[in-house]
Amino acid sequence: MGKTKKTEAPVAGLRRYLPLIVIGVIAVIGAFTLRDYISFDALRDNREALIAFRDGHFVLTILLFIAVYVAIVAFSLPGAAIATLAGGFLFGTALGTVLNVTSATLGAVVIFLAARMGLGNRLKDKMDAADGVVAKIKKGIDENQWSMLFFIRLVPAVPFFVANLIPAFVGVPLYRFAISTFLGIIPGSLVYTSVGAGLGEVFARGETPNLGIIFEPHILLPILGLTALSLLPVLIKAVTGNKELVK
């Protein structure tokens, strides 16, 4: 019986880490094998075939697009920006944004659950039991979860996969993660989807899209404004907390 329990523990541990291991392996393989298939050149060269397929099988195209986009995000594969452009190119700005945001959120939920299953719960328990600085950081995150979640989504400099992992490691509830992801990525997705919607003219001119457009002042400043707004509750809580301490 003792041997059985000892052998069951490593097996249970391996099962816990299996989703993360699978994601890591696929991500590494995809980084070396898919760059030529999910690229701007591939989209440009196959644009007529994609449009023809969309016109003949509209619903199927939507389903396949969502499946591919979810896989790209869930397995951290290269080509998320290209997929967003393709969403705008195939479905226009409005529908394309809805599909891009929905697909990215579903993919983010997959990697969030895998990370939480593998490491998240254990890290959360350790942080809950910690003292000192770690305990203060954990308390600060817990008290301002919505603000911090929107903050890491709205800041363009935070990599998407990092914003998927951090909440899993600090014990953020799934519903908060999903809602903040869906709403938080809308501004950036809208920008890139609108660029994708205009790819027809870009292709006609033989040019490439400006993916750095999100960092131009007229776009970046409103996003930074939303970022600052997301931190407003944290600031208010800090100010009122200091007043209470003074009293």
Image: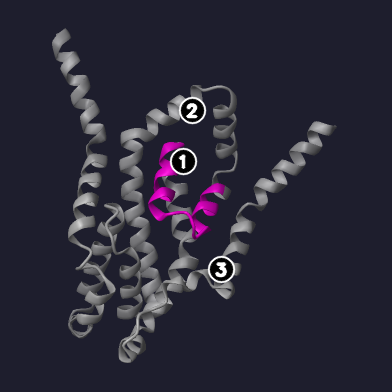
Residue placed furthest toward the right: 247
Residue 147: x, y in percent? 58, 49
Residue range corresponding to the magenta coloring: 148-170
**N-terminal of the two: label 3 or label 1?**
1
Check residue 155 for magenta coloring.
yes
- The percent coordinates of residue 44 (x first, y second) are 25, 81
Check disc 1 and give the amino acid type. Answer: Val
Q: Which colour assignment does the render follow?
A: one colour
**Which secondary structure, mark 3?**
helix
Q: Which mark is residue 172?
A: 1
Tell me what residue is drawn at x 79 percent, y 35 percent: 244
Residue at x 26% of width, y 72% of height: 62
Disc 2 crowd, CA 10 A, few/some/many (<14, 14-19, 20+): some
Mark closest to the chain's N terminus, 2 or 3: 2
Q: Residue at x 16, y 18 (%)?
A: 7
Badge nearest the viewer, 2 or 3: 3
What residue sits right under mark 2 in the picture? 127
Give the residue at mark 3. Answer: 220
